[in-house]
């Protein structure tokens, strides 16, 4: 271990305490890099509390992060609940069949509490076992006696802190997080799956260029970039809000909908300043990641030096471009004010950047719906198959169902049919908020 490692056991000593009611493990050391595994992996530094019926995990701010019940109150031992920084609960399921990893590139399927465009999954938030955890986790914690004879001071102190973090405290903290940037991020880039959506959101700009008719996550704000001072203020406020748990983060999302359209200097300033202030160089989680969205116009107008500079940053950068369709008829139908010719040029530039820069992956999105003209899929396949001389593992293509709250086997079948023809990795985009 690096002696400069501030997240080593000397600073986060492990403690364990067990009696006939609870088992507590402080400062467990999880994996330091995100990985795609077919079994549940624990990441970061965290603490764990087991009662007779339930298992909870907490971050370094003593905030609940994961929860599940023990059998017989929980039917799937390898499934669990995760609470996000936006204070949503996400239920991670195996999906019940083998197609999850082929569909979304991950072994576990996130089931969300709100309506989204997912084609997969059930309704875990309607089940008594999940509702039981969401209702009971804090009352269960509140009843734990911290003055039990023989309980070490470190354990009773930690339990007292855990008990003070109520659902109301967590809701207020999420609101404080949204207030730092001015609004909740209603959509995160699909590439953020590589960090299990554990990102720190830093707003570089508000709004977007196009205000497409089909889009369900747009807002009314015109595209406006933030000032350097505003970005610096956000960074300081975020550092304070994430507190001790910031060592468990290594991923930055530069919002809002079109970070790539911000000036090069501002993008680089935001990434470098955040890296320095958030201490990504000696975080517990390794291999820093940078995520943002870009529009077709932003990509076509971007200076080559931006990509040169991004490639030299201590991040692996993923930029997600909303192409939506390479068919003029479809673009007009969905109300996206760009042309198929622009989309084709943007697609070519994405491939060129992916080939040239090791530390950058550009990905893109296309819409998917049974009611779109046949020319939509045909023109998309001309790009993802016809234009590609060979298969490539880099540059994922995400298909985004247009309909929300409408899982459909037929559309899933269409997806698999397209995926088998693509020479680029192809996945479904499940729209997820912060
Ligand atoms: S798809 Fe992108 S550019 Fe179009 S309205 Fe939505 S956020 Fe804006």
Image (cartoon, rainbow, N blue to C red):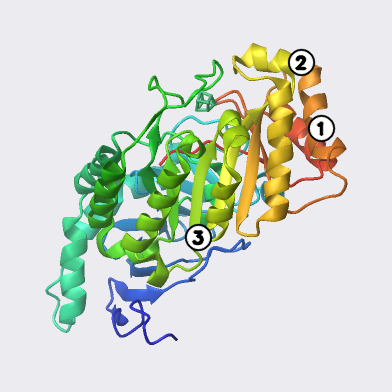
In this rendering, the label closer to the viewer, 3 or 1: 3
* Residue 198 seen in the figure: no
Rendering coords of residue 410 (x, y %): 74, 27
Drawn side of residue 146 relative to residue 312, left or right: left
Rendering coords of residue 112 (x, y %): 47, 39
Q: Secondary structure at mark 1?
A: helix
Q: Quadrant of residue 319?
A: top right
Residue at 38% from the left image edge and 22% from the top image edge:
221
Rendering coords of residue 122 (x, y %): 56, 38
Residue that mark 2 sits on: 373
Q: Secondary structure at mark 3?
A: loop
Give the CA separation, mark 3 to mark 1. 34 Å
Label 2 Cα neighbours within 10 Å, binned few <14 / some 14-19 / many ≥20: few
Q: Secondary structure at mark 2?
A: loop
* Residue 375 seen in the figure: yes
Residue that mark 1 sits on: 381
Q: Mark 1 vs ligand 1: CB under 8 Å?
A: no
Give the CA separation, mark 3 to mark 2. 42 Å
Marks 1,2: beta carbons within 8 A: no
Residue at 48% from the left image edge and 68% from the top image edge:
286
Q: Is residue 5 above or below residue 96?
A: below
Drawn side of residue 327 relative to residue 305, left or right: right
Quadrant of the image containing the C terminus: top left
Q: Is residue 219 above or below residue 272?
A: above
Residue at 65% from the left image edge and 56% from the top image edge:
357
Residue that mark 3 sits on: 313
Give the CA separation, mark 1 to mark 2. 14 Å
Numbered-mark total: 3
């Amino acid at each position: 271990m690096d002696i400069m490692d501030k997240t080593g056991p000397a600073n986060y000593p492990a403690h364990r305490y067990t009696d006939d009611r609870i088992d507590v493990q402080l400062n467990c050391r999880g994996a330091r890099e995100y990985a795609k595994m077919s079994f549940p992996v624990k990441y970061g530094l965290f603490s764990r509390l087991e009662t007779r019926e339930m298992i909870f995990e907490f971050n370094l701010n003593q905030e609940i992060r994961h929860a599940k019940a023990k059998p017989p109150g929980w039917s799937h031992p390898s499934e669990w609940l995760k609470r996000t920084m936006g204070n949503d609960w996400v239920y991670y399921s195996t999906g019940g069949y083998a197609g999850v990893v082929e569909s979304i590139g991950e072994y576990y399927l996130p089931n969300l509490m709100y309506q989204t465009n997912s084609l997969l999954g059930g309704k875990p938030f309607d089940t008594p076992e999940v509702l039981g955890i969401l209702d009971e986790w804090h009352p269960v914690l509140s009843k734990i006696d911290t003055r039990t004879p023989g309980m070490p001071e470190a354990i009773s102190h930690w339990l007292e802190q855990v008990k003070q973090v109520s659902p109301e405290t967590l809701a207020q903290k999420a609101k404080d997080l949204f207030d730092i940037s001015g609004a909740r991020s209603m959509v995160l880039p699909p590439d953020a799956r590589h960090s299990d959506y554990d990102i720190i959101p830093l707003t570089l700009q508000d709004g977007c260029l196009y205000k497409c008719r089909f889009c369900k996550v747009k807002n009314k704000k015109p595209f406006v970039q933030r000032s350097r001072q505003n970005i610096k203020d956000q960074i300081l406020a975020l550092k304070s809000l994430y507190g001790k748990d910031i060592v468990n983060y290594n991923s930055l999302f530069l919002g809002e909908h079109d970070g790539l359209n911000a000036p090069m200097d501002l993008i680089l300033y935001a990434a470098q300043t955040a890296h320095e202030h958030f201490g990504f160089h000696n975080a517990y989680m390794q291999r820093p990641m940078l995520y943002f969205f870009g529009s077709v116009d932003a990509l076509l107008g971007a200076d080559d030096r931006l990509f040169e500079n991004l490639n030299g940053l201590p991040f692996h950068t993923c930029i997600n471009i909303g192409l939506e369709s390479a068919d003029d008829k479809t673009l007009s139908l969905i109300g996206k004010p760009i042309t198929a010719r622009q989309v084709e040029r943007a697609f070519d530039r994405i491939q060129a950047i992916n080939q040239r820069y090791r530390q950058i992956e550009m990905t893109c999105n296309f819409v998917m719906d049974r009611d779109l003209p046949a020319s939509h899929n045909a023109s998309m396949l001309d790009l993802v198959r016809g234009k590609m001389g060979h298969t490539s593992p880099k540059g994922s293509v995400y298909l985004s169902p247009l309909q929300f709250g409408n899982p459909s086997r037929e559309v899933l079948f269409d997806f698999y049919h397209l995926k088998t023809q693509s020479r680029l990795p192809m996945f479904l985009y499940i729209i997820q908020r912060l």
